[in-house]
Amino acid sequence: MKKSILYVLSLILILASNSQLVIAKASELTENEKIFQVLNRLTYGPKPGDLEYIKKIGLNKFIDNQLNPESYELPPFLMADLKSNEAIMLSPAQILQNYGRKMIASQNPSVTDKTELNKLYVKNLHKIYLLSAQARIERAMSSPRQLQEVMTDFWFNHFNVSHDKGLVHLWVGSYEERAIRANALGNFRDLLGATANHAAMLFYLDNYLNSHIKENPHEQNNNKLKLGINENYARELMELHTLGVDGGYHQNDVINLAHILTGLSLWHEKMPKNAIPNEAFGSCFYPNRHDFSSQTILDQKIASGGLDQINAALDLLANSSATAHHIAYELAQYFLTDDPPASIVNKLADKFSETHGNIKAVMECLINSPEFFDPKYYRVKYKSPYRYVVAILRLSCLKYSDLNNAMGLLGIMNQMGEPLYSCLTPDGYKCTKTAWLNPQSILQRISFATACGSGKFLTGQNGALNFELVFPLLKDTLTPATIDTITKAPAQLKPALLIGSPEFNYY
Amino acid sequence: MTNINRRQFISNLAIATSFLMCPGLKAVGLTDSDNETSQKNKLLVIFLRGAIDGLNIVTPYGDKRYYEYRPTIAIPSPKDDNGLVDLDGFFGLNPGLKALKPYWDNKSLAFVYASGSPDPTRSHFDAQDYMESGTPGVKSTTSGWMNRLVSVLPKSQSPINTVNFGPIMPRILDGPNKVTNISLGKALAKPQVYDRPIINKFFGELYTNSNDELSHNYNEAMKAHRIVIDELQKEMVAANNGAPTPNENFGKQIATLFTGQANITSAFISFGGFDTHVNQGNTKGQLFNHINNLGNGLANLIEGLGAIYKHTTIVIISEFGRTAHENGNAGTDHGHGNVIWLLGEPIKGGKVYGKFSGLAANDLYENRDIPVNTDFRDVLSLILNEHMGISQKELNNIFPNYNLPKQPLPIFG
């Protein structure tokens, strides 16, 4: 009690004697803090050397490079890893062929027991999941194109699919690579079209079953599946992907959009002659299953025309001001603060509309806004489990191949409630503090930090983290009390306390 | 702080609107004295993931079509030595659940037949999602119904008021209200890395220095953790002989945490392995083994609850049932209606509730599955209202856009 009164008194004295300086400090970030804000929000977190690098090339240049990912070459080891990664390099049909049940049966003719075959299939699923996860995590760790990676996480959750549902398991890596990452800083309409046409989304939200006729052209599925109109994707397309839940659409719009989307299904080798395949995305448009009639959505008539009608509907949705506002809000929440002010949301929405969904332009607008460097929003975001784990991996400066237990890391994300590619619901994982801060999570993070500190997940010269490099980097973000505790602690506990500190949970 | 105010606000709302109660529901206002009563009552929800074959759990052996439909996987009639345990002359209990028969006899075990989700999906993914969100057919619901329940439960003294037994927070507990998760198993009673004195000391210092939200969460978590450790170590000393297999062990651990200092009010646990498309088995095999463990675990749980059993309702649900006919692989495929299990002294047991319309093709849903004649929310709403003291107004938040039928099942008498 006495202490705090003294503290307040001395604060008042400081304020009184040096008010101009104090006010200046509160209204503007220091140069170092600005660099940290950029590293926190546009990358998965600082690693040793980043500060010096940015000071050398200049903060504006760094931001510009991040907005233009092609400015950076990927390091050769990363390129080599990615090029040999089947989860992202093969087409969905090839993945199904190489990892699906049919291949298991043909590769193991001696195995006839269904339970045994199933075990082999599960093993394959495991393999492809690990490959998909590797493509994500090793880039998050080592790619200099950090903003592209952060935006990949953002858009993946916006256009979420869950690998827990059937064949999505095989295609989640391909979906992320071909539909999401390729368009992460591109044009929103392209991104929307890519997700609409990828096999993973078609399967996840059931549009592959959405059909004007009630028969299934897929030979292998012709048993009990009832076909007809399936509204699942149409609804989420408006509610989650574009307009937003209050975006002004009605149940009739959902039904009509579902009719428009009929016939957009999975690629199949025995597709009819008039089908229009998209092999790279594992999808196909089946005119025989499509409802060739004109439809009205959002009070606009959309003329019949098969795929053209689908594209016209996507155009309409992508260009709606409700969509601009919805995306602007989500971006501001993800990159600035959990409860973003209307000023920034409106600014971003205007930029989105004005540029017809140019994502890079919207991000540039966000970074150049005074709000972005407002001290109010400095280190106020709470790390999701995924971000927490990846931030530690980056601090370690290790390569993915150095990790001695990658599967264990995925298990940690699972324990913390954010298993990679496994958000069951189409709204994706949240990025807010309320979603992730709970009592158990603090203990889980402390356990994980302690394990990392003792080299359980990370190998390296000095155990896991090089404290001599990491502590000076993070020191300015720590309170004096935390610095004091870490200073007093025995050497082997210091790295754990640093990454397990309350401060390290914020970015 | 804001949480408590919000809760009081909701409680006041409930009192203000209690005259709006629908006739089927008990009028409940959360006054302070009611709080104390409600606090005694406990709820455990068990989810059997993968769609358990209800027809082989509570079997209508009195309908001879059952044996026609299932030539290799039917459970023999009660006349057979290894056969069903007779319940009422028409239904019989799978012999794997023999351990539960005493509770049928003392009328604390009941079933609701032909029950489930009104949504027709046969996707595990969607059906589980709907049962956990409590909003069949609506995917955009962001929270689970048990999380919404937390906001209207009276605040308990224990930091582990509502808990998931398992490593990750399930959909049913997702949401803005604070819940905890505890992983059952041998490791639970073991000290964790943060119990090591030096680690405890330094992290304790980090999380009291900053005196913020994170420190508050840290302290809550450590309190819960210590209670769990204390209670379970007592338990291990008391019962170190004849330890049950780990699979059956869940009952004892949950009982320990429902009683004693931990004093959990509501909890959730799920078990998997019920998607028996192939080689389901009958009086032995995969389904038998799973439910045998489950039944024995439940019996351990009830025994461990002791006097608390009087205040406990256990409800066991699964996302949908399975086909009435067995398939070509001696298994069953995804169906529709299932059976809900109810355990607890508050239950008016010894009875199979719900409308079972027989196995004739015409009486089956799409000529193949047990229909859903009772919405799973009918059963859950009754439990929440009659057992947990949740008012009509509050039920509307827990199960939005849903109304209890005019004549609810008399499962609480």
Image (cartoon, grey):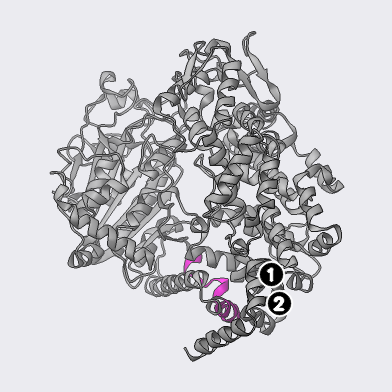
Q: Of helix, strand and loop, which mostly describes the magenta segment?
A: helix
Residue B124 x/y as whole percent = 45, 36
Residue A456 x/y as whole percent = 69, 64
Do callouts 2 and 1 mark residues in contact (Cβ within 8 Å)?
yes
> Considering depth in this image, is A344 or B270 the residue closer to the camera?
A344
Other-residue count near label 2 (Cα within 10 Å), few / some / many at <14 / 14–19 / ≥20: some
Chain letter for mark 1, please: A
For this view, does B79 lie left or right of residue A180? left
For this view, does A472 lie left or right of residue A434? right
* Residue drawn where x is 51% and y is 19% of the image: A260
Mark 2 or mark 1, earlier in chain? 1
> Considering depth in this image, is A257 or A444 the residue closer to the camera?
A257
Magenta residues, start to end: B187-206
Residue identifier under label 2: A492
- A436 is higher (above) or lower (below) than A294: below
> Considering depth in this image, is A150 or A440 the residue closer to the camera?
A150
> Can you tell which mark lies on residue A24?
none
Q: Judging from the image, what secondary structure is the residue with disc 1 in? A: helix
Q: Judging from the image, what secondary structure is the residue with disc 2 in? A: helix
Q: Quadrant of residue A195?
A: top right
The amino acid marked with disc number 2 is Gln
* Residue drawn where x is 55% and y is 64% of the image: A444
Query: Which residue appears farthest toward the top when viewing the image?
Result: A273
> Can you tell which mark lies on residue A453?
1
Q: Is residue A120 visible?
A: no
Residue A200 x/y as whole percent = 60, 32
As for residue A253 lying within the magenta part, the answer is no
The amino acid marked with disc number 1 is Gly
As for residue B198 lying within the magenta part, the answer is yes
Q: CA distance from mark 2 to mark 1?
A: 8 Å
